[in-house]
Structures are given as structure tokens and as C-alpha cells.
Image (spheres, coloured by chain):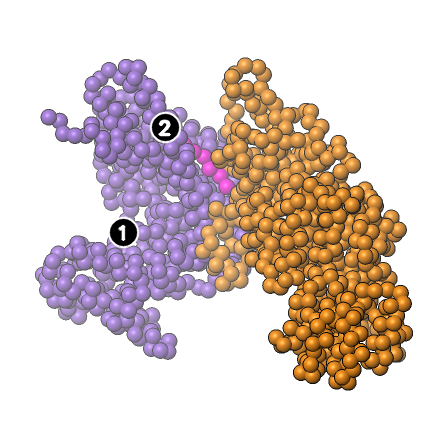
Amino acid sequence: MATSRSNRMLPNPQSPVAPAAPPGYVGTIVGESTSREFRLAVAQEAIREQDLIAVDAELRPTDGQGPPEMIRVWAKVQRIERLNPLFPSEAGHELAATRTNPFETVLSLSREMVTAVCQVLGAEPRGSNPRGKLDQLRYPPQPASSVYRPGSEDMARVVLGELAQRTNRALDIATLSNRPEVSVSVDGHAIVTRHLAILAMTGAGKSWTSRRIIEQLAQKNYPIVIFDPHGDYTGLADVPTLKQRVRRYCAQFPLFDEDADAVAKIVSALGYELSPTMQGRFGDVFGAASRFINVDGAELASRVDWLAERLGKEHLRKNGIEPNMWLIANLAEAGELVLRAEDDDSRNLLVEWGWEDFGKYSKRDIGTLEAIKKRAYKAARVLQTMEQTNRKIARSAEPLPTDRKELVRYGGISVIALAGYTGDFQATIYSLIANDLFQARVQEELKLPVLLVLEEAHNFVPGRANTPAEERSITTTKQIAQEGRKFGIGLVMISQRPSRLDETTLSQCNSYIIMRLVNPADQNFVRKVIESLGEDEARLLPDLDVGEALLSGQLINFPVLVRIKPPESKGEREEEDAFKTLEDTYRSLQ
Amino acid sequence: MTDPELSNRRLTEAGVQEDLQRQPHLFVRLAENALTVAESLRGNYFKNTATFIAALRKAVANARQGRRNDPILEVHAVPETSWADVQDEVVTFIDGGVGQVQLASQVPILLRVGSYRVRTGERRLSEREQFGYYPVILGDLEGGSKERKDFIDIVRITAELLAGLAALERTPDLRVLMFHGPLTYLVGSYAGHMPFTEQDIDLFLRQYAQDAHIALALKEEFLQQAHLDIYPKMTKRPDEWARQKLFEPLAFIAFLLRQLRDRARQRRVPTLIVGVVERGGLRELSETVLLERVFRGLRQKGNGDYFNRMYGRTDLSTPKALLDRLGYTDSLLIAMLLEPGQYSESWSISKFDGLRRGEVALPGLAGEETVNFEALKPGPFGFPRIRGCYLHVSEITEPVRIEVFDELADADYLEAIVRRVYLYSRLLPGYGFPVGLDIADKYAHIPAWLTNAYSKLIRYHLGISLQQGEISDAEMRRVLVQAIYMTHRDWLFRPEP
């Protein structure tokens, strides 16, 4: 009996001898092949999903004239299917029910068929294509062709494409996931001019990725402004090569940049609800406070003295006043006390200092002002706590410059710490600063381009605005996303909840780094918005390792699975062992 | 219900009916029978079957419990066997597949015999399993009567037996050799084929023996036996047959079976050689053993008319008549009598009653000569005797018939085989058949793309011949056009005016 080992068809003496399998052989094309996809009968365990492979082909000219074109077709392994047609599933159930090892039985375990479905990436002329540019393949590769894994150099050449020549634009951020010896650089120009989205669930490595990109851009002196809600970028300053370039800023909420209604809403949200009567008077108080402080020098000192005297708060004299909620509360209290005391002189002063309608207030307004005062003080305390928290987290940070253009420096990284503030406050701070920078570029007052990095971008540009702060933030970001390229403002949006991002803004990004996503809503959203993400790539998302990412869009020649290289900096929230921290802390308390 | 209560219920008519309702495959068989039996038997067919089976079950149970001296059928339980008991055994499964092309009808063109050899417990895949196959293109054979529908069967039987011999030859420690189908067929119906030529046998042997000397030795041994002992009993011209080196198919098959038996017997631990039959149509156990005893018992009690009274007839006085009228077969009765995990007593199967005198054409000669096929009945140079039993594997499948060589089949040998057939079949409870034979069957299966390719090739060449006018006979042209272009709506089949 001819056995499977010895049963080979004798070669027909009249047919040419088939060439030996190429080095790096991984399989043979079987079944139907198209110019977009083909199937491969895989040599045992020779490849993995997302591997890059190649097959050599010849293409005759359509007019039949001239020699054939020798090309190499590049493809990516999308999925691998493994089947043993001689192992009945019924038997498998019986083995499970009886806890029997199949090796102990007469079942066949050796006749596996492994097939890979491969997506064609493109084709290049064999022999000479230093730029690694792949052309569209217009004719399918031949069934029964041998497929092989190209060498590392060839892979790097094709993955990098034209970036290999334009090294000034190349950001070295990763290696091929299945080929760690092949470095992957991305096009920095595409990132800074046409926006990038980094999407990944918590813990998948997106801050690690963004820090790597930021460090690479910083080496190219590109100005970067980072909106940092959680202190992920505080460690940037510790990187030796970035030490002098990083400036940290703590954020103050620019209360008097808002209108009275918005501030009234803040008071309601942070204190107690303002009744309609109170809201009516609140506008007056707000306007009065704004005008009260809008003087300087001796006049301001005099007003502060008066206030301190009126309220019995010596610390005002000592510390001065700030344009903040305390001032609004102080003014409300002052107004209340003046009305109670029926002090006409003080009333006139207040009118003079900008409380325009105070002259018409009656005793009925005492209660209203008292209520406003209480609410404003409560809101002020909450706001102060936020600011203190922010300053604490931001560590040695300076206050935000009034002239926002100072945030943009050649080779500089400005980290705006937003931690401690609630979402609305963060969104407000961000949109004011981003809008200022955008307008400065439009007016050509800001000469340098800038890249804005938004961590937790779904808080700044959510799919649906629930508050005026969010509305403003969305509008600002949309404008930058749509027109930023013209004015040299780029965006990097980082989010672990992509399904909560504004779809239009996300679709304006031309480059994507997608890491592990398990939430089905997020996966579906990403597939819907990102055209270059195929079905098979989308299926990989829940199973990606920490640090693994799919690169897609203009930053890379073609979608590829990579492992991000570690950044040099550490984030504030790099996790230490919680139990170790507990023990250390306890010991320190003894 | 407790176990004894369940057991007792099983022996009642109601119990039988409940069992049948749980076994739709049996229910359907009985329903088919009920439609085909005489009208007078149709009315109470199910009820009477249930009554009959209940009585049989009671008789079997009483005999097992010692309450009856004359068992109508001995029933044994398959001893508890686990895979641990059969570790490090080499088992070979043999099955043949046929590829057919659709011309005017299904025409067999390819045979492929598959063998699957496995060593249980072996962890190294390369050492554990080995597959073998070889396709035979039927057009390559000179002998055999190709115009007969059973030509492919003759070829397949020969090829499978050679595969079995090769497995024995190559595997010194072969413990089990299992064939899909009977170990020996009802050979009478295959008599009369034109003998194979030596070239045909060379074609078979080239593929089935690694060593050319072994192949030659096998061929020479047959030719010598044929010349000295077999053909002189079969034909008036044995010398002529020997001179022409003719291989009469049944004589050669009988020779191969004897070789299998003898070589297995020579081993220190005789190889267990078995054929396993699914969906068999025999009635022999029922007719010659079971019902013989039933009728004897009835006659002993003066109740010989029992079935006539039950069915209101007068002709149900013998086992044959009963089976003829009621359409019962062995597998149907055994399925209702045995529980899963039980097997019946064995009996010597009459495979050779059909061997008589017949006419045979010789290759290259006109006319036919009379051949005495009775010479191939069991004897030193005839077919080995075959012993069989039925094994019920699962409630949802029909019992399988196990066939072994009678001369090897002592109680231990048969039990060893039954245990293994049962163990291998338990992995496919929905099929109730040894899984290794299923694997060999799948391996031997000729894929549709292959037969489709051949079909296209044949049609193409026929078409070319037709168009080139190479076939001038008008009738032949008509037949060929039909063969190539026939569709179910082909206008060529409209009636002639």
C-alpha cells in the first residue's frame, strides 16, 4: 500500500521541474484568489495573524508586447483557520463527557488543514523599489504559488515607504508586533497637520503611546500644548532630554471671562439652586464684582480697604482680592450689609464703583442678597478646593499666562494640569485656551504652529453636549479639526471611550492608533467611523496585548499591527503596588 | 421507577411500545413494513410486533436468569472496557471509496482504498498515525466484466483485501484489522465475472506491497494453488487457465481471505480481523437460530399455530414464512431485543449457498465456458467460514453486524473484538459505528472536484470525437450525444414519431 509518506505522484517527464520552495516559505495559494484577497494553505505553524508575507508573480503586458513584469505582491494575514476534517465533533463531545484524552483513542489527530486568509496590500516591482511604495494590484496572484516571509529589511522598507527617505518626518514609535526586529516609524507630518486619534481602553497603553509620540515630536522641536486632566504628563519634565523644555501650568478658572448666566449656573451647580429672583439679582452682583476689581493701584487698594472694613475681614486687606467667586460672594455680602444698615453713602459708593442698579434696591433685596451670598460662598469654597487640588497635583507648576501665546514655544512642551476640576470646568478652561490659540494663528499673531494634545478627549468633545461648557468645547474642537490644517494647529485626541466622542471630529482625524478595546459600543463606533479599519482588524481589538496597537491612516503606509516602544517619561499615575504602598506608608507613620 | 421495575416494564407490550416511541429509526422501519405487508397483517402490525417482541424479551430474560433451560437467543453484555485497557495497540481500519461521473447515468471511474493505522496512546503524531491510499482507475483493468453493475464491487473487494494483507505484512504488532463491510460478501451473486489478467493483478500488487518480492510471491502462490488445486475443480481447462495466468476473481478473493486468516493465526497473539456491517439486510440469525428455536418451543408446547392465531392467517408456520410475510430482518429484531451494550450469540453465516455452476467469458476469447463455483465453498482452497454476531451500540442506532473468521473465533477472540468495536463506536453514539472506519471512509472519499474534473475530461474528449466525425455508426452517435448532452429536459428523449 502506498502510504502518505511515500505516495508521491511521479513527475511527468515532459513537464518542467517545479522550482524549490523559496526561503522563508510559509505556504501555497489555494482556492480562488482575487486582487484583494487570497487563501493560503499554511505550512505548519509558519505564520501568525497580522504577519506580512509576499508572493512573486509575473504579469504579461495586456497588449502581449514586451517582457513580463516581475512583481512582488505583499499581503497581510488576516485570519488563520484550523480544521481537522477527520475529527468528528460528536467524538469530541464524547471525549469531554468521559474526560478521555484523544491520544488514548483511535481518533485521528494529525490531519489538520490550516488555511490563512490574506489581504493584498499592494505590489512592487521586484528588485528595485527603494521607496517601498506599493501599487494597487490589478490581477490576482496565481493559485499554487509559493508564499514566503520576506526578510526584515524588505519589510522595513515597505512598512516605512517614503518615510525611509524623509527621515525628518519619521517618528520612531514602534516595532512590528510579530517581528520585533523591524522598527516602525510613522509620519510625524501627518500627525501634526492632519490630526491623530489614539483610542484604547483603560490600561491598554494609550498614555504610554502618546508620551512616546510627544517625546519624538519634542526631539524635532515641535511646539506642543497638552491638556492633562489626570497628571499623566507630569513626568515629562523628568526626561533628561526634555528637562528644560517642559513647563507645567496650573489652571485657574477664568470666572470673569464667562457671562453672568454661566456663572449663575456654576453657583447653582456648586452651591444651592438660585431661584429666579436670585438669578435676576445675581447678574447685577456679577457685573458689580467684575467692575469692582477692574481698576488698579490706589483706587483698588481703597476699594479693598472699604470692603475689608465693611465685611470685617482683615485678611482682605492683607491678601487683596482676586477676580474669583470669593469676590462675588464678598460683594453680595457687602450689598446685604449696606442695605441692612441703610447706609446711603456706601450705597452711592457701590453704585459709583459699578453696581449700577444698586441705588434702586430696597429692603426686600436684603434676603435675596443674603441668599446669593451664601450660595456664592459655598461655590467659592468648592472652587477653591478644586484649584488647590489642581495646584497640588500639578506640583511645581506656574499659573497660566494671561497671554496664551506664551504656551507655544519652539521645542517647548506646555502641560496644562486640569486635575482637580470637574468636567465642565476642564472643558471651559480648555476651550478658552484652545480658542485663544486658534484665533492667534488666524490673526497671525502666533507665528509658530502647535500641536494640541487632549487626554480624555471624550470629555472635551463628547458626541452630545449636555452643558453649555461642553457645547463650547465641541464647537472649538470641531473648528480646529476642520480648519486647523490651514492654520498650523494639529490635534491629538486620546480617549478610552471612543463611542462618546463626537463622530464628526473623530472622522476629521486622518491617522489612528487603536489599541485594545473590549466595549462592543466602542468597537462598533470605531469601525463605523474609521474607514480604513477592516472587519478582520476590528475583530482583533478585544484581544490586543497591552502596548499593541493597530496603526491606520496617513501616518503609515498601510494598516499594521505594532508594539509601541516604551517612552522615556513616566506618568504621575504609574501604578505602584497598592499593598506595598500601604505597608510603606504604615511604616512611615510608626 | 426502580431498576427492577424498569426491567419488568421492558418485558411488557406497553414497555416495548414505549421503547419504540423513543427510537424513531425503528418506528419508521416498522411503519415501512406495515405498508408493504399483506393487508390482513397491516391492521395490528405494531401491536402484534410489540406482543411478539415482549414475549421474546421475556424468554431471553428468563434464560439469562436461569428460569429457562432453552434460551431462544443468548445475549451477552459487553464487558466494561476503557481506553486504558487497549493502550499501545496498533489498529488498522480499511475502507474503499468510489468516484463516479455523471454521463448518461452514474458511471464509476475511480476507486480509492483508504487505510488508517493508529497506535493508541502514542503521543508523537508522526509515530501515532499513518494514512495510505491509492486510486485505481477502472479503465486500466483488462479483466472483470465491466458491463456488470457489480464490477466495481469485485475490484473494491480485491483492493480492500490486498490493503488488509499489506497492513498485516507491514505491521508485525498489528492487533486489530477492521474492514468496513462484511468480511466476506454473499459471493454467489458475484460469480461469472471475466477473470483478471496478470497485468491487472500486477497493477493491484504494485500499489499494495512495498517489496516487489512479496508481491511476486503472493502472485506465484496463488497461481500455483490455482493450477494445482483450484482450477482443476472449477473448469475443464485448468491448464489453459494456468497458462494464461488468469485470476478468476472469486478464487482470488477466497485466496486472499485465506491468506489473511492464516497469517493472523500464525501470530503469537492472533490479529483480531473483523468486518463491521452497518444497516445489514440479513435475516439469517432470525430465521435459522432465533425463530427456529421459537417455533420448536411452540411446537413443544403444542402451540405451533401461535402466529397464525395471532395474525389470523394459516401460513405463518415456519420462520421463513413469518419473516417473508412480516418483513422483519435481523437488525430490526435484534434492535428491539437487545439493549445498548449487549451483543447476541454468534452463528456461522451462510455466505456461499449461491455458489453454483455458471458461465464465464475469458479475456480475448469468444464465447463462454461453464465454471463450477461450488469448488470455492469452504474447504482447504475455498472461502473461509465466517461467524457473525450483532452488537447494539446505542439506543438511537441500529445494531451492527460483526463478522470474523470462524476458525479463529473462540469465545475470547470474539469477546476481544466485540469490546473494541463497542469502544470505538461509543465515540460516535449518533452513528453507532467504529470511528476509525469513519475516518478511513472520509480519507478514502474521492472528492467531487476530482470526479467533476474527470467528467469534464470525458465529455470533452467524447465531444471532440463526435465533432471530428470519428464515430460513424449512427446509433453510437446517438448514444454518445445523449451521454454528453443529456439533461433532464433533453429533447433527445422525446418519443420517436
Using a 10 Å C-alpha cutoff, classify the residue at mark 2 as few (fewer than 14 neighbours), some (14 to 19) or many (20 or more): some
What percent of the width, then of the height, locates residue A189?
72, 40
Residue B352 sits in quarter: top left
Residue drawn where x is 50% and y is 29% of the image:
A9
Mark 1 vs 2, N-terminal side: 1
The chain identifier of the residue carrying mark 2 reads B
- What chain is colored orange? A
Residue drawn where x is 13% and y is 27% of the image:
B496
- What chain is colored purple? B
Reading the image, the residue beneath label 2 is B456
Tell me which segment is drawn in magenta. Answer: B131-140
Secondary structure beneath dot 2 equals helix
- Disc assigned to residue A270: none
- The amino acid type found where label 2 is placed reads Lys
Q: Nearer the viewer, residue B102 or A130?
A: A130
For the stretch drawn in magenta, the main secondary structure is strand
Q: Quadrant of the C terminus of chain A?
A: bottom right
Reading the image, the residue beneath label 1 is B282
